[in-house]
Image (tube, rainbow, N blue to C red):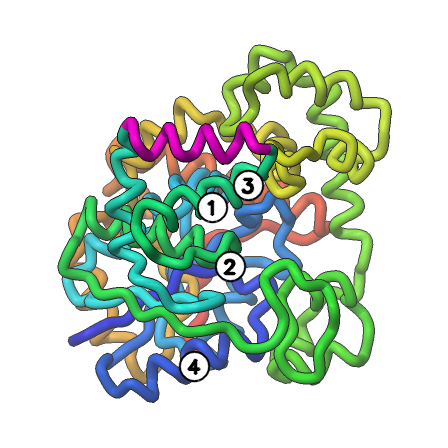
Amino acid sequence: MKICAIICEFNPFHNGHAYLIEQIRASKKFDAVLCIMSGSFTQRGDIAVCDKFTRARHAVTGGADCVIELPAPFAVAPAPIFAQGAVKILSSIPAVRALAFGCEEKIDFFRAARVSADENEEFRSTLNSLLSAGESYAKSYCAAIGKLSGENVVGSPNNILGIEYAKAILKYRPDIEIFPVERVGGGYNDEHLYENYSSASAIRAHLGERQTAGCLPDCVMADLPRDLQLAERWNDIMRYALARAEKDDLKRIFGCGEGLEHKLKSLVTLPTEQIIAEATSKRYPSSRIRRILAANALGLYADEVRTLSEDGGYIKPLAVKGSACDELFKELARSPYPVIIKQRDLGTLDAPSRRLYELSSVCDDVRAAVARESAYDFTLKKV
């Protein structure tokens, strides 16, 4: 079996995601599409609009064969850890032969990855020179890669993630191919609502509005929450957690250094969105500030997450196409990581993997509380 994998959030699953899967199918190179998806919280620190089992079912209904979970400590992390955690799990499955992802434009991602992988003196010098000129970190990082590799690296979240995916593949399974697909419709952070292909950011910004229907499969539209206060309640929890946090604990979170912990504590009396706005700068984009606040509220600390990204792992299926279930599960079972379907399977986890699972379960409990839903963890959706 030849599997093409996708690293995703599907928050929510929309027509652009379906298009990506269609392009994989159209290549006729693969027997199945396997997604590894963030669970209850996303890489930018947002709370997922629907629970992980519902979003996984949407993906299988929309064309995927199976969805497994990306553990929360990797999901709510900077791009290198997000990519490494996902690729490490996917690369453990021998049948995974390629990784597909959306991008603004196709470049030689492996070439760009090799330039930045070791961050040698020439790379650091180029990067620091660009930062000193006043550019943001993301733009400077991409410009440094572009200057040294000769690739036209657009400083978008998708292309940055693509380079991080390539770096992780080179580390864990260099035989895995990259299958980039150029995005259609709205860009990653574009909140404008288009007729058919809007970004997940735009759809979340317009939740509850009828015009989002053209951008979503019917099953997703039917399941979107009617309670539009979910994000606001999560903002309140992040602000409360910041108020209780010690500065030394804030410094343990990815990206919270160089005095940023003092800045955040000084803003704690403000509403969360204003905290983020006041702390945002060229060096610290709003996505990083929100992720720091989320990681603090969820107890996800960099030192522990780095260790778990090297030592921990498991495969937790969330949804699977019924007709492909037996064959796919045989392939998943070939991974050295335990497959977790029932509670008794937790006994197969070693200590780091058990800790990884526990942290993810806490995040599920937090999301359920914020969403005022029941928490459940052992429900495999067969579609």
Q: Earlier in the sequence, mark 4 or mark 3?
A: 4
Please state if 280 lies on the left or on the right of 131 as rendered: right
Q: Is residue 255 above or below residue 17?
A: above
Viewer-closest of 93 and 178:
178
Q: Secondary structure at mark 1?
A: helix
Q: Earlier in the sequence, mark 2 or mark 1?
A: 2
Q: Position of residue 227 (x, y in %)?
A: 80, 60
Q: Is residue 254 above or below residue 260?
A: below
Q: Earlier in the sequence, mark 4 or mark 2?
A: 2
Viewer-closest of 277 and 302:
277
Q: Is residue 1 above or below residue 137?
A: below
Q: Which mark is residue 9?
A: 2
Q: Which residue is mark 4?
A: 63
What residue is shown at x 65% (from left), y 38% (from top)? 290
Res. 341 visible in picture? no
Viewer-closest of 20 and 53:
20
The magenta stretch is 121-133
What residue is shown at x 32% (from left), y 54% (from top)? 150
Amino acid marked by disc 3: Cys
Q: Which mark is residue 363?
A: 3
Q: Which residue is mark 1?
A: 75
Q: Position of residue 241 (x, y in %)?
A: 69, 26
Amino acid marked by disc 4: Gly
What residue is shown at x 63% (from left), y 20% (from top)? 260
Q: Secondary structure at mark 2?
A: loop
Does the residue at mark 2 contact the one at mark 1 (Cβ under 8 Å)? yes
Disc 1 from disc 3: Cα separation: 11 Å
